[in-house]
Image: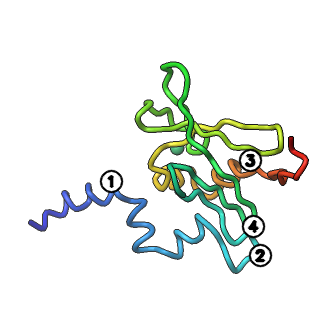
Amino acid sequence: MNDPHRKAREQAHSVQDLLRELFPETHRELFGERDSGAPPTLGLYPVADGRLALVHGDQLAEFTPIDPKGKNALHCDLCHYTRSRSEALMYRVTIAARRTRYVTLCTPTEACQGRAGARGLEAFADRIFPIEPHGPDDH
Ligand SMILES: [Zn+2]
């Protein structure tokens, strides 16, 4: 019942979940610092319709899932793991009126962000932001 070895294995498998539950301060360090003058928020958050929102301070980018072409394995642009096609999705993000970027991200985004860490998230956000606002004369 209380086999310590089994418990250790289970903890290893869900270390990211445990990090959030047991060490919320560490989790907050990874995903956003509020007291150091750094942007208050940095992270990817699932929103409606399978989309993801990338939030960095007061900036926001919306990732819309698309059907990737071909049959190649996918390479996550955030944690840089190679993923099978069932483990990742391609997303389209509009970064300016006529500029669209495509990114690949693991489907379970929390574990992905845990692998990438704060530095990985920042590097990823730097590739996306700043988003040019969409003016009324886009078209
Ligand atoms: Zn990933």
Q: Position of residue 21 (x, y in %)?
A: 40, 72
Amino acid residing under circle 4: Asp
Q: Are marks 2 and 1 in contact (CB under 8 Å)?
A: no
Nearest-to-viewer mark from 2 and 4: 4
Q: What residue appears at the point 91 percent right and 47 percent down from the top-left corner?
A: 137
N-terminal label among 1 and 4: 1
Q: Residue at x 70, y 49 (%)?
A: 123
Residue that badge 1 annotates: 13
**Closer mark to the observer between disc 3 and disc 1:** 3
SS under mark 1: helix
Q: Relative to 6, is 70 on the left or the right?
A: right
Residue 58: image tag: 4
Q: Position of residue 75 (x, y in %)?
A: 55, 32
The residue carrying mark 2 is 37
Q: Are marks 1 and 4 in contact (CB under 8 Å)?
A: no
Which amino acid type is shown beneath numbered disc 1? His
Q: Quadrant of residue 86?
A: top left
Q: Nearer the viewer, mark 1 or mark 4?
A: 4
Q: Which residue is label 3 attached to?
A: 128
Would residue 60 be found to the left or right of residue 30 on screen? right
Image marks 3 and 4: residues in contact by CB distance under 8 Å: no
User: Where is the C terminus found, in terms of image quarters?
Assistant: top right
Secondary structure, mark 3, is helix
Q: Mark 3 vs mark 2: give the one in front.
A: 3
For residue 82, side relative to residue 36 (left or right): left
Front residue of 83/53: it is 53
Mark 2: C-beta under 8 Å from nearest atom of ligand 1 = no
| Viewer-nearest residue: 100 or 30 | 100
Q: CA distance from mark 3 to mark 4?
A: 14 Å
**Residue at 56% over, 35% down:** 66
Report how far apart the C-alphas of labels 2 and 1 lie in the structure: 34 Å
**Do labels 2 and 4 touch, CB within 8 Å?**
no
